[in-house]
Amino acid sequence: MKYAVNIPPFTDVATVVSIAVDAERAGWDGVFLWDHVQWSPDRPDVHDPCVLLGAIAQATERVRLGTLVTPLSRRRPTMVAKQVTTLDHLSRGRATLGVGLGAPDDLDFGDLGDESDRRTRAAMLDESLELLDGLFGGPVAHTGEHYSVKADLLPRPLQLPRPPIWVAGVVPNRRPLERARRWDGIVPIGAAERLTPDGLADYLGGDAPADWDVVAPWAPGIPAGEYADAGATWLVESTWPSEPGWEQEIHDRIRRDPAAD
């Protein structure tokens, strides 16, 4: 089992980097950031995860780094490929890309002039994933429903054939799970009662591809071994950043060896 912290970058940037550095010191295996432009009216401070991950890459040596999760419909695939490749070089081969549809549909999409229809965003996600896979290896000549790209992006990522791609899916929806099976892992999200070890095992159905990650949220009080038995390979600590003091709360939680729990 590996352990990660997923930080909402909804506070000052120094605090986010400090949490990441302390997570590595405490023995965590990964540091990930939420990816939003706007999140809620009462949480106006939202920083860009790509820039912050570059800073964290320079301040750490071991932890895997990435987003949980980037809504690909809101970003040009060529720019995502450049950003992930640059992070891979900055971190010396530690980059991971988590992707999904994203939310909320209004604040983070429709209100910004981006596509808000979830079916359309799902189609854009599928097409952009195929395009990204090609861009990481290049060259690419692609003409599709949503994207038209001719490019040979250099340099290539350090990780070959590309950095891992994890796909988020709301449990119990099956289509995101099938999408994730074509890539390197699944990030199950949704209601807490569906994300217990038993719920996770039911969702996965006991049939996971080889070398495939299951990146599960870690509920308080449930031993890591129960998640491992259900098929999880990563456990993720995060927080809901709506109450005052949430930054200190998650910072305190990660100042411990996660494998000791």
Image (spheres, grey):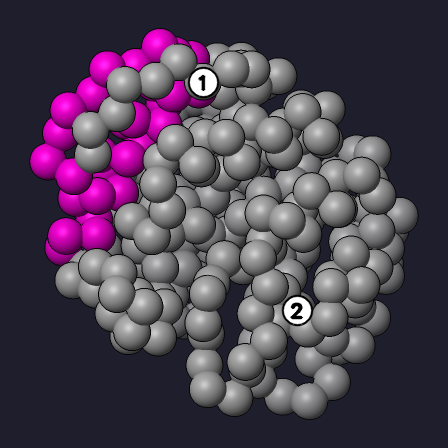
Residue reaching furthest to the left = 145
Q: Earlier in the sequence, mark 1 or mark 2?
A: 1
Residue at 71 percent of width and 30 percent of height: 90
- Where does the image place residue 150, in percent across and percent down from the top left? 27, 18
**Quarter of the figure that contains the N terminus:** top right
Residue at 55 percent of width and 82 percent of height: 43
In this rendered view, identify the residue nearer to me: 116 or 61.
Answer: 116
Q: Is residue 258 magenta?
A: no
Query: Element under label 2?
Result: loop
Q: Is residue 181 left or right of residue 258?
A: left
Give the answer, above or below, for where 157 lies relative to 199. Answer: above
Three-letter amino acid code of the residue under disc 1: Leu
In this rendered view, identify the residue nearer to me: 102 or 200.
Answer: 102
Q: Quadrant of residue 155?
A: top right
Give the Cα distance between marks 1 and 2: 46 Å
Report the disc number at residue 153: 1
Disc 1 packing (10 Å; few <14; some 14–19; many ≥20): some
Dominant secondary structure of the residues highlighted in magenta in the image: helix
Residue reaching furthest to the right = 25
Residue 174 in sight: no
Give the answer, above or below, for where 37 lies relative to 133. Answer: below
Query: Element under label 1?
Result: loop
Image: magenta residue range: 119-146
Q: Is residue 193 left or right of residue 146?
A: right
Q: Quadrant of residue 17?
A: bottom right
Residue at 40 percent of width and 60 percent of height: 189
Q: Is residue 177 left or right of residue 28?
A: left
Q: Which residue is mark 2?
A: 221
- Where does the image place residue 92, in percent across and percent down from the top left? 72, 24
